[in-house]
Each structure stands twice: as structure tokens, then as C-alpha cells.
Image (cartoon, rainbow, N blue to C red):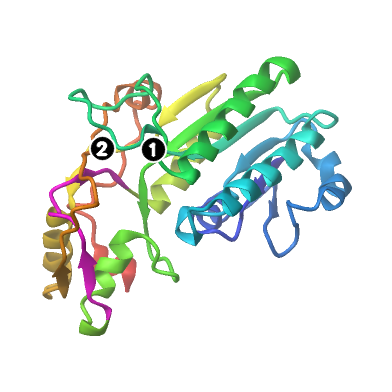
Amino acid sequence: MIILFGSTGFIGKSISKKINKNIINYNSKNLNLENLKQIKKIAKNFKNSIVIYAAGIKRTKGDNFENFKKNLIIFNNLFQSFFTYTPKKIIFLSSIEVYGEYIGLAKIDEKTKLSPYTNYSLVKIFQEEIIKFFSKKLGYDYAILRLPGVFGNEKKNENIISKLIKSQNKKNKFILNTSGKEKRDYLYVEDISKFIIKLLRKKLNKITLNVVSGNSISINELIKIIEKNFKKKLFIERKISNTIKEYNLEFDNSLIKKKFKSFKFSNIQTLNLKKIFE
């Protein structure tokens, strides 16, 4: 049995749809993870299951201590139940934000030093360490997946690509506070759910992976790609801020290519974005 936490979130919804069968979906509508009593009522389901954790409060909801605390509480509440009803495996959706404002010359890989700079990235590191530490004591396997920017037709328009596409309308102009030269890796949300399906079929014990395409592009390049796709000029207002530090996040994706030789991530430069976002 597969247990998915966060099934109504942007990524969680895609995962739930792809798996479809033999899955129990939990989300804020049917389970309050801050309420330990509610978790205890359904905890028997966790025993020998595969737990996919895509829940939690996103940074876009506020990178403050209150949300940091809530993210730890809901995660720790789950682990209290895992001591009695231990899952077979935990798949945890982490973030490449754990590497912080990276200034190294080499491309980032799984051995790169972690350097959190937000409450959100710090809580992800804590959660990763909790999973690793208790796997030795409780005997479950795990896969920690560090995700970059994720895009797709998201109703709330919280990802940068959604916001840029929305800026075709002058009323929704995009405010760019940097030079736009900083590079980032972006993944199509459907690729993440497909990757997790592959992961479920593969026997991998206790692994941490940067789930990245290895194809980082700048925001300026991203703007050109979107304008070409939609054949429209975007309304971009450039207000460079001296307080924002610009840095690149480029990845060495050797490990994921080695472990998943046949898996190919979509290339944002060749994807039909108009079709995805229509």
C-alpha cells in the first residue's frame, strides 16, 4: 500500500493521479497533521507501507518561524506513529534550496555542502536528518528527493514560469528584481510523478538524489522561450535590487543518470508550453 501525504498540493495531485491504484491519499481536507489524535486513528495504515511525503507549508506561504515550527510539528507527529507502525519505505520530497546561495565553481552534486539560508530550507534539512537517523533504528528504507523549481499548469500561479506566462497581460506584469542572468534548473511536474513511479519499481536503499535535468537556464532565457511559445511579448518591469544576491544553481546530474539510465526529463526549451498552460 502507498500512503501519500499532501495529495491536493501541486506535486501531490500529479503523483496521486499517476499512481491511481493501491494508494491512500491524505491532505488538509481529510487529515490535520498538527493533530496527533487524528494521526493515531489512521496510523495502522502506515505499517509496511510506502510513505510519500509531499505535504508541508511551502515557502511561498511565508518564510517565517511560525511556518518553520508547523512544518516540524506535523513531521514529528508522523514519526511518533512510525515507531509503532513502521513503513517499509519513505519517499521524501525535499528541495535544492538546502544548498543555499551557492557560490562554488563546481556544479552542485549530492556531496555539496548544505548551506540553508531560509527557514524553509533549514526545516527541509532537519526533516532529511530525522529520516536518515531513524531509518537505522526502525529499519525502513528511504529516498530523499531534492527538487528544483517545478512548473506546470498551477491554478495558484505560484511558480515563476506560471507568473511569467501570466505576464502576457499588462495587468499581471512581472517584476524582475535581478539582472535575470542567474541560472536555475526547472522540472515539469508530470516528470516528477513519472520519476516517482520509476522509483517505486526500483530497489534503491537509503538514497539521497538531486532530481534535476542538469539543464539550468537563466530567467532571461526563460522569458525568450515563453515569448517564442506564445508569440507574445511579456510585460516585464526590471527593478534591480541591490539587496538581492545573484547566484547560479547548476547541477552535476551524474548520480540520477547512473541510477535511472533510461529516464529522460522534458526539455523546457522544446516543450509546448502553450499546450501545457492553455
- Position of the C terminus, as image quadrant, is bottom left
Does residue 152 show up magenta in the picture?
A: no
Indicate whether 140 appears above or below 146.
above
Numbered circle sitting on residue 60? none
Does residue 185 show up magenta in the picture?
A: yes
- Asked which secondary structure carries label 1, the reply is helix
Q: How far apart are the two marked residues, 1 and 2, measured between alpha carbons?
A: 9 Å
What residue span does the magenta drawing correspond to? 172-186
At 38% across and 66% down in the image, what residue appears? 153
Does any portion of residue 201 appear in the rendered image?
A: no
**Which mark sits nearer the N-terminus, 1 or 2?**
1
Q: Is residue 258 left or right of residue 237?
A: right
Numbered circle sitting on residue 96? 1
- Position of the N terminus, as image quadrant, is top right
The picture places residue 157, in percent across and down from the top left corner, at 39, 68
Indicate whether 132 appears above or below 160.
above
Numbered circle sitting on residue 249? 2
At 37% across and 32% down in the image, what residue appears? 99
Q: Nearer the viewer, residue 184 or 143?
A: 184
**Crowdedness of circle 2 by 10 Å Cα count: few (<14), some, many (20+)?**
many
Cβ atoms under marks 1 and 2 closer than 8 Å: yes
Q: Amino acid at mark 1?
A: Ile
